[in-house]
Amino acid sequence: MKLMEEKILREGTVLPGNILKVGSFLNQQLDTAFLAEVTREFARLFADAGVTKVITIEASGIALATLTAYWLGVPCVVVKKHASANLSKDLYTTEITSFTHNNTYTAVVAKEYLKATDHILIVDDFLAVGNAIVGLRDIIDQAGATLAGCAIAIEKSFQGGGDALRAEGVRVESLAMVESMTDDSLTFRHS
Amino acid sequence: MKLMEEKILREGTVLPGNILKVGSFLNQQLDTAFLAEVTREFARLFADAGVTKVITIEASGIALATLTAYWLGVPCVVVKKHASANLSKDLYTTEITSFTHNNTYTAVVAKEYLKATDHILIVDDFLAVGNAIVGLRDIIDQAGATLAGCAIAIEKSFQGGGDALRAEGVRVESLAMVESMTDDSLTFRHS
């Protein structure tokens, strides 16, 4: 998606540790008009995929997942990073290691929100090594549901998570694929 | 908003510790069609208030804040509960005690996303004692920006946070005001 690549080139900055900072539009400040276009593209790509539910993990995927689910006319389920007082006791859980935050946490979701009949689209802002998506797939598997695919705003393709999923037959749609990045250059993969 | 009260009566449950569980539509599973209606009402209420930015705190206010900002045609700023590697070092910070999670954390936002010229609408799913909103007001004050008001899905009015803000002249619009709740009854305030 040319729009996403142009936005990254215009507003993104590269930080030490392979971090692409896009806080001005994607996850700290949300450029809502831009995100509406991005998520309409997700909805268009998966329009015929029979999606019954969108799933994401808090927090930075929530805006994208909400809008995508709205355009698709389905609910959105938010997997939590921590158990809290208002979660039921009947949970699916999975361990996820965060690349950005350099920690491991137990992600949880109440069983009542995922059905074996659900065909689920994973939406997230970033796909790097793919740990969050592996965790979400594990939860989808536990529920006996099926995976429609992954809709990703920015894939850091050089970190391999997207290709590993594709090699397993998972449909991964990334609106920009960053093939390399340094302080002063950033290249995209097109394929 | 009759729609919100009906939804709470139909799908909400009361848990020990004054917790109203609305996970089926508001913060675990998101009923996106319903949230679109809710946030259109927020946008209608504040249409003439000169809002330049919506602000919320992660994670459960993000869906509402994103949609509200989209209808209003402004960006949405997400205050983070924890510093992370992709945040700048130039931050506004404030201490917030969570009623739901029973802990205190340092909320942070990069200074670059809030300007002294901003007129800011706070959006959140719940208003109880009001700690999150007091923290967000503190951040808005630090930025030298002004507060347009607060758009709240569910106010637990018996906990006093909303009225304390109104007594200070803050415009607080809550789509449902829960005046009392027990295991088998729930009453709303209309005023």
Image: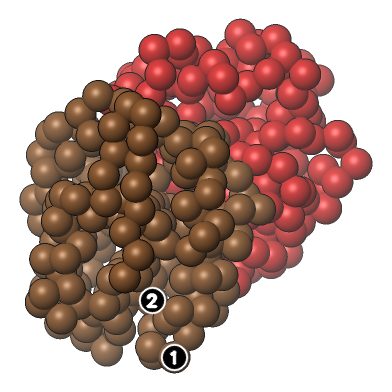
Chain colours: A red, B brown
Q: Are marks 2 and 1 in contact (CB under 8 Å)?
A: no
The label nearer to you, 2 versus 1, is 1
Label 1, residues with CA under 10 Å away: few <14, some 14-19, many ≥20 = few
Query: B102 or A121, which lies in front?
Result: B102
User: Which residue occupies 17% across, 73% down?
Assistant: B166
Asked whether the viewer can see residue B165, the reply is yes
Apparent side of residue B27 relative to residue B70 in the rendered image (left or right): left
Apparent side of residue B63 relative to residue B144 in the rendered image (left or right): right
What is the CA distance from the residue labelled 2 to the residue labelled 1? 13 Å
User: Which residue occupies 76% across, 33% down?
Assistant: A52
Mark 1, secondary structure of its residue: loop
The amino acid sitting under disc 1 is Asp
Asked whether the viewer can see residue A125, the reply is no
Report x, y in % for residue A140.
64, 17
Q: Chain of mark 2?
A: B
The amino acid sitting under disc 2 is Lys
Q: Which of the two discs, 2 and 1, labels the residue nearer the N terminus?
A: 1
Mark 2, secondary structure of its residue: strand
Report x, y in % for residue A68.
67, 50
* Tag 2 residue: B53
Q: Is residue B58 above or below residue A133?
A: below
